[in-house]
Amino acid sequence: MGTQFQPIAPRPSPVRQSGPLVWARRNLFADWKSSLFTLIIGVVLVWALPRLWQWVIAGAVFQPDPNACQAARGVGACWGVIAEKYRVILFGRYPYDEQWRPLVATLLMVATVVVSCMRVFWTRWLALVWVASLAGFFVLMGGGVPGLSKVRTELWGGLPLTLMLAVLSLFLAFPLAVLVALGRRARLPAIRTISVLYVELVRGVPLISVLFMASFMFPLFVPQGVTVDVLVRVVAGLTLFIAAYMAETVRGGLQAVPKGQFEAADSLGLGYWQAQRLIVLPQALSMVVPSIMNTFISLFKDTSLVTIVSLYELTGALALALNSDVQWRPFKLEAYFFITLIYFSGCFAMSRYSLWVEKQLAASKAR
């Protein structure tokens, strides 16, 4: 006899693993606590969004008219203050007719940073690109060459100064941080002691104190007649400060590298610096990418503290633009929203890039 046919019982259809409904169920309504919290936030948004729309868009004044802004106070925002003062906020006291130069310098700096974040450009030529970019930035900002009038560093300000301080300090601090981290793990007591003293002394004081010392106290210790530009002193202070914090981050990564990796490097006959460059440091740095990026983001925001030494970066230029104009002074809130958007854009871009780097490193380790 032939085998009797036995039908298979019907199975439920497969559940979708992607899509907006799946995302909402997984992230907003996973359990009763999440559902309750989502509903509370929804009620708050329903109440707040119409009022926010009224203040931001419907009742706002977009023309640079102080009288219209005064009439709209309490009803809508005065975005006209940005239309009126954006050049001072973005470029500070830089000569008005020459403000195309800081604009081009800023675009050059941003383009170099973006190119450096792309893997296709990670070649030995990238270092030369950075040297050329920094040289171009300082030539455009400072002038003093045929065709460009000289502009003193005291007049630099706004967004170009913020970017330059953050990028240049990070550019100089990273190799110093790696050397200090290696010094703290060195076998020679002298090198280890110097590294420990440097880290503990710098981390034991706030950044404001470091900037104050670099700007006002340092000139007291140089020979009479020798002057160091205030911008150079501030960059040096930021570099030393951020390098101390980053050195501890790198040291944590070095401690997390398995001891077998060091033994493997010794068995291959690699010297100390070869082992660090080819085996140890790549692994250590890959483990602390989030912490390093947090340090970068923190420094980008902490550049606002240089206002205490009379360098008017983005926040200082905003105060400079509004404090001297009685008509626009009441509308600081809208101007602060403007620079908040700039800071948020930079910090958000860095955080997303950090996540991308982490995914790339995780994929390489999986292979």
Image (cartoon, grey):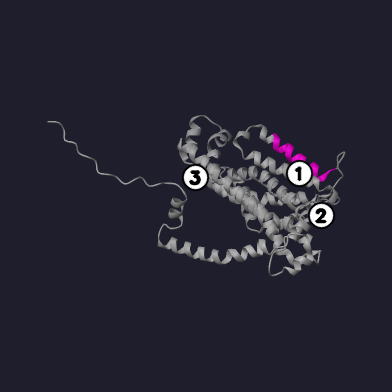
Q: Is residue 325 left or right of residue 200?
A: right
User: Which of disc 3 and disc 2 is earlier in sequence?
Assistant: 2
Marks 2 and 1 sit apart, C-alpha to C-alpha, by 16 Å
Segment colored magenta: 128-143
Taking depth in this image into account, of 192 and 226 the one nearest to the observer is 226
Q: Position of residue 157 (x, y in %)?
A: 77, 53
* Residue carrying label 1: 105
Secondary structure at numbered mark 1: helix
Would you identify the image quadrant in which residue 51 lies?
Answer: bottom right
Q: Is residue 250 at least partly visible in the picture?
A: no
Q: Position of residue 216 (x, y in %)?
A: 77, 57
Task: Specify few, some or many for label 1: CA neighbours under 10 Å numbering under 14, 14-19, or 20 or more.
Answer: many
User: Which of disc 1 and disc 2 is earlier in sequence?
Assistant: 2
Total marks shown come to 3
Q: Is residue 235 above or below residue 268?
A: below
Taking depth in this image into account, of 37 and 131 the one nearest to the observer is 37
Taking depth in this image into account, of 21 and 145 the one nearest to the observer is 21
Of badges 2 and 3, the one in the foreground is 2
Numbered circle sitting on residue 256? 3
Numbered circle sitting on residue 93? 2
The residue under label 3 is which amino acid type? Answer: Ala
Identified at 49% across, 37% down, the residue is: 364
| Pointers 1 and 3 in contact (C-beta within 8 Å) | no
The residue under label 1 is which amino acid type? Answer: Ala
Most extreme residue toward the top is 269
Q: Is residue 326 left or right of residue 45?
A: right
